[in-house]
């Protein structure tokens, strides 16, 4: 077994100079993508509790029940299609 010296502790300045990067969840990523590629971007959406309850009722009434996420996406697509044909 080789014997090595104990590493010298780094000073605060040496530690800071090493740098690093922020966690991926904090750093927004913006990339250019060809229009044919589908890239999903997470979006936070604040929805009033009463509206969310109505959405959940609408989801539960359908068979097979879509997820709440899919139901909201479907509603967005319907609205975009309706507004683009006017």
Image (cartoon, grey):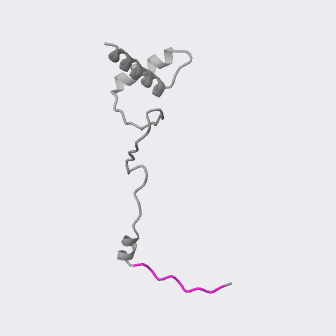
The answer to which of 40 and 63 lies nearer the viewer is: 40
Q: Is residue 82 above or below residue 34?
A: above
Number of marks drawn? 0
Which quarter of the figure has residue 5? bottom right
Q: Which residues are magenta?
A: 2-10
Which quarter of the figure has residue 53? top left
x%, y% of residue 3?
A: 62, 87
Q: In the image, 28: left or right of 37?
A: left
- The secondary structure that dominates the magenta segment is loop
> Which residue shows up at 40% across the image and 42% down it?
32
Q: Is residue 42 above or below residue 79?
A: below
Q: Is 36 contained in the magenta span?
A: no
> Which residue shows up at 53% across the image and 20% down it?
65
Q: Is residue 39 above or below residue 64?
A: below
Q: In the image, 1: left or right of 57?
A: right
Q: In the image, 19: left or right of 64?
A: left
x%, y% of residue 57?
A: 45, 18
The answer to which of 2 and 63 lies nearer the viewer is: 2
> Which residue shows up at 43% across the image and 51% down it?
24
> Which residue shows up at 36% across the image and 75% down it?
12
Quadrant of the snapshot with the N terminus: bottom right
């Amino acid at each position: 077994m080789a014997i090595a010296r104990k590493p010298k502790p780094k000073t605060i300045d040496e530690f800071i100079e090493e740098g690093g990067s922020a966690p991926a969840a904090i750093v927004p990523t913006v990339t250019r993508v060809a229009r044919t590629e589908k890239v999903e971007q997470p979006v936070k959406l604040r929805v009033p509790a009463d509206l969310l309850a109505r959405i959940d009722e609408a989801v539960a009434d359908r068979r097979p029940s879509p997820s709440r996420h899919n139901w909201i996406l479907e509603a967005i697509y319907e609205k975009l299609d309706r507004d683009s044909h006017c």
